[in-house]
């Protein structure tokens, strides 16, 4: 395997990355890995500006028809030697330490809570029945679930709640697929079938110790915005405090309304208080009529608080250090990081410091339009699953 494109971690997980200019070796490496029969499943995260979904489907069919895989488009990729957007990234999990299966839920905008619960429960039971296929292990703490979901579906809260209900004691994390901040259409692929308006749920049983965690870096201020006119189904707010939403938001954060941009939203997030904790309700974009579209659920009467990001480098580093304190040295982390965190890091000239943390702990994943963590759909948060470093290297590279 060409070392520029691939890294094998001690648990046997292989990470491959490529740019469009060097992709031939990437697909050859995936094909070699697939033909070895050593890998349970692959996850692919891709910029659909550089790697259209049809091209991903065709390359996988050509080079790795044997490999089960799930893929989604991104708002940026995390991992690889250059840490630049516009990549395709693959994560291959070895069969000797991981058991995995996937189910796709279609029509999530209209399917409803109960049908999602039923589909996931059925898939969970099927997965549980195969649990002893991995060296006889079948302990509850060995299992986790990952959700990849259409980031333009506007139903992530409902889907996440349904998944949490169906999964019961199985912890969930994941990310909303992106489309490079175009906000038009995302792409998800499961074994060659491309779709949007869907979610892919992956069940994993792991013989490698792991820890699911999250981190954010905002603090609330005393500035409040009350939603007085909105369209909850489309996540659009028309008025704050009985005033045009964009103008009132701009006034609250001290910015000219004409200058509002993704950088403004990343630097001045809005948060809602739930059960004593604050959760981001991030702005996606300004609409021509002065309304604001959001990444998360909103409704009339909700009180949003202007927050200020603070200490991203410190809080991120502390989160990873806390994980090390629980599971020991980290082998690698599968991470889902809000695209607004990336923008805020760029705005505060902290990009290199954050990248060094991610490189230190071998973070691979993508920038999202939203993050899933247990029962919650979040914004402006990093959610991840850290896998412990094993005493001895396990598995072999392709």
Image (cartoon, helix red, strand yellow):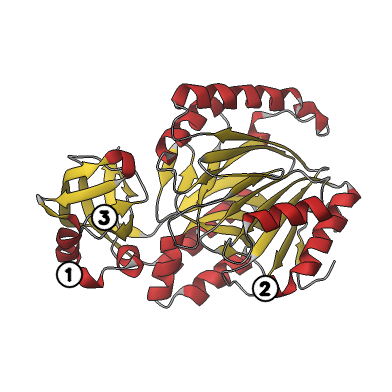
The answer to whether 141 appears left or right of 149 in the picture is right
Residue 217 visible (yes or no): yes
Tally of numbered discs? 3
Label 3 with label 1: CB-CB less than 8 Å: no
Q: Nearer the viewer, residue 346 or 318?
A: 346
Q: Position of residue 141 (x, y in %)?
A: 64, 34
Name the mark on residue 292. 3
The alpha-carbon separation of the residues under discs 1 and 2 comes to 39 Å
Mark 2 or mark 3, earlier in chain: 2
Decide: is 309 above or below 201.
below
Q: Position of residue 188 (x, y in %)?
A: 59, 47
Reading the image, the residue beneath label 2 is 81
**Mark 1: which secondary structure?**
loop
Rate crowding at label 1 as few (under 14), some (14 to 19) or many (20 or more) other CA atoms within 10 Å.
Answer: few
Please name which of the two marks, 2 or 3, marks the residue nearer to the observer.
3
Q: Quadrant of residue 212?
A: top right
Q: Residue at x 55, y 71 (%)?
A: 355
Reading the image, the residue beneath label 1 is 254
Rate crowding at label 2 as few (under 14), some (14 to 19) or many (20 or more) other CA atoms within 10 Å.
Answer: few
């Amino acid at each position: 395997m060409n070392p520029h494109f691939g890294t094998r971690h001690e648990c046997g997980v292989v990470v491959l990355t490529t740019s469009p200019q060097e992709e031939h070796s990437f697909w050859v490496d995936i094909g070699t890995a697939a033909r070895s029969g050593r890998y349970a499943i692959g996850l692919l995260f891709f910029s659909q500006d550089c790697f259209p979904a049809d091209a991903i489907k065709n390359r996988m069919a050509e080079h790795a028809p044997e490999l089960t895989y799930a893929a989604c488009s991104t708002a940026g990729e995390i991992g690889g030697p250059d840490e630049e957007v516009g990549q395709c990234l693959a994560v291959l999990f070895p069969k000797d330490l991981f058991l995995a299966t996937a189910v796709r839920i279609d029509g999530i905008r209209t399917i409803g809570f109960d049908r999602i619960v039923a589909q996931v429960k059925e898939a969970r039971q099927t997965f549980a029945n195969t649990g002893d296929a991995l060296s006889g292990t079948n302990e509850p703490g060995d299992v986790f679930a990952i959700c990849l979901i259409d980031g333009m579906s506007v139903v992530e809260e409902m889907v996440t709640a349904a998944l949490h209900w169906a999964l019961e004691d199985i912890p969930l994390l994941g990310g909303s697929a992106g489309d490079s901040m175009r906000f038009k259409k995302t792409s998800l692929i499961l074994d060659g079938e491309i779709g949007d308006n869907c979610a892919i749920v992956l069940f994993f049983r792991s013989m490698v110790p792991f820890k699911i965690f999250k981190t954010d870096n905002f603090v609330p201020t005393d500035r409040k915005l009350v939603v007085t006119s909105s369209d909850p189904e489309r996540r659009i707010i028309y008025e704050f405090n009985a005033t045009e939403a964009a103008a009132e938001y701009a006034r609250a954060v001290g910015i000219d309304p004409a200058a509002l941009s993704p950088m403004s939203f990343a630097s001045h997030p809005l948060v809602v208080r739930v059960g004593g904790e604050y959760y981001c309700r991030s702005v996606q974009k300004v609409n021509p009529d002065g309304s604001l579209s959001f990444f998360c659920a909103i409704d009339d009467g909700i009180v949003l608080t202007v927050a200020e990001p603070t200490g991203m480098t410190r809080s991120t580093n502390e989160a990873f250090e806390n994980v090390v304190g629980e599971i020991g040295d980290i082998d690698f982390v599968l991470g889902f990081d809000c695209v607004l965190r990336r923008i805020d890091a760029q705005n505060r000239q902290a990009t290199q410091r954050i990248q060094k943390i991610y490189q230190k702990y071998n973070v691979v994943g993508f920038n999202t339009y939203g993050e899933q963590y247990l029962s919650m759909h979040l914004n402006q948060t990093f959610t991840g699953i850290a896998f412990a470093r094993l005493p001895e290297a396990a598995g072999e590279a392709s």
